[in-house]
Structures are given as C-alpha cells and as structure tokens.
Image (spheres, helix red, strand yellow):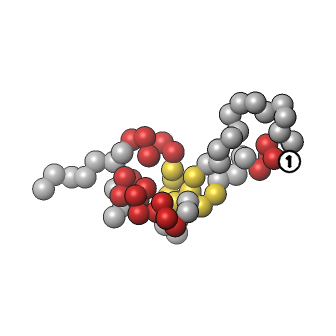
Amino acid sequence: MPKMKTHRGTAKRFRVTGSGKIMRSKAYKSHILTKKSPKRKRNFRHDTELAKADNKVVSRNLGLR
C-alpha cells in the first residue's frame, strides 16, 4: 500500500494545533471592505476552530486519520 498523499488545497487552507484541533480562517474578508465595520474586519483576522461536521473529511485530506 503506497503512502497517503496530502491534499494540497486543504493543506493551504487549514492548520493543526498542538492539541490536534483543526483551525480555519474566516470568510468574507477579501474584498468589498468599505461597507464593513472596523470591528467586523478586525474579527476576520482571527482563526476559528473547524466545525465538528467537517472534521472527518478535512482530517482525511490532511492525512491525519
């Protein structure tokens, strides 16, 4: 059985923390920023934990499980 390959598109979008959580960046921060409040734009900078429903697929694509 050959080694499992990492899905490169997934690897660029997600990162794994030391405790094993999968983190993702927030959407809606790339353009049309003039109508968005500074507080909203500031909150887009922080990563959030991936939803539990998506964990299985993303972790398989990253080659974790």
Question: As displayed, is residue 32 above or below residue 53?
Answer: above
- Whole-percent x and y of residue 14? 51, 50
- Could you say which quadrant of the image residue 7 lies in? top left
Image quadrant occupied by the N terminus: bottom left
Question: As displayed, is residue 14 above or below residue 22?
Answer: above
The answer to whether any part of residue 18 appears in the image is: no
The answer to whether any part of residue 45 appears in the image is: yes
- Whole-percent x and y of residue 60? 35, 58
Q: Answer left or right for 24 relative to 31.
A: left
Element type at mark 1 = helix
Residue occupying the point 65% across, 44% down: 27
- Whole-percent x and y of residue 59? 41, 59
Residue occupying the point 84% across, 31% down: 34
Image quadrant occupied by the C terminus: bottom left
- Whole-percent x and y of residue 24? 57, 52
Q: How many marks?
A: 1
14, 40: nearer the viewer:
40
**Other residues around mark 1 within 10 Å, as few (<14) / some (14–19) / many (≥20):** few
**Which residue reaches farthest left?**
1
Q: Answer left or right for 9 relative to 2.
A: right
Q: Answer left or right for 43 relative to 15.
A: right
The amino acid pointed to by label 1 is Lys
Q: Which residue is mark 1?
A: 39
Q: Answer left or right for 8 relative to 31.
A: left
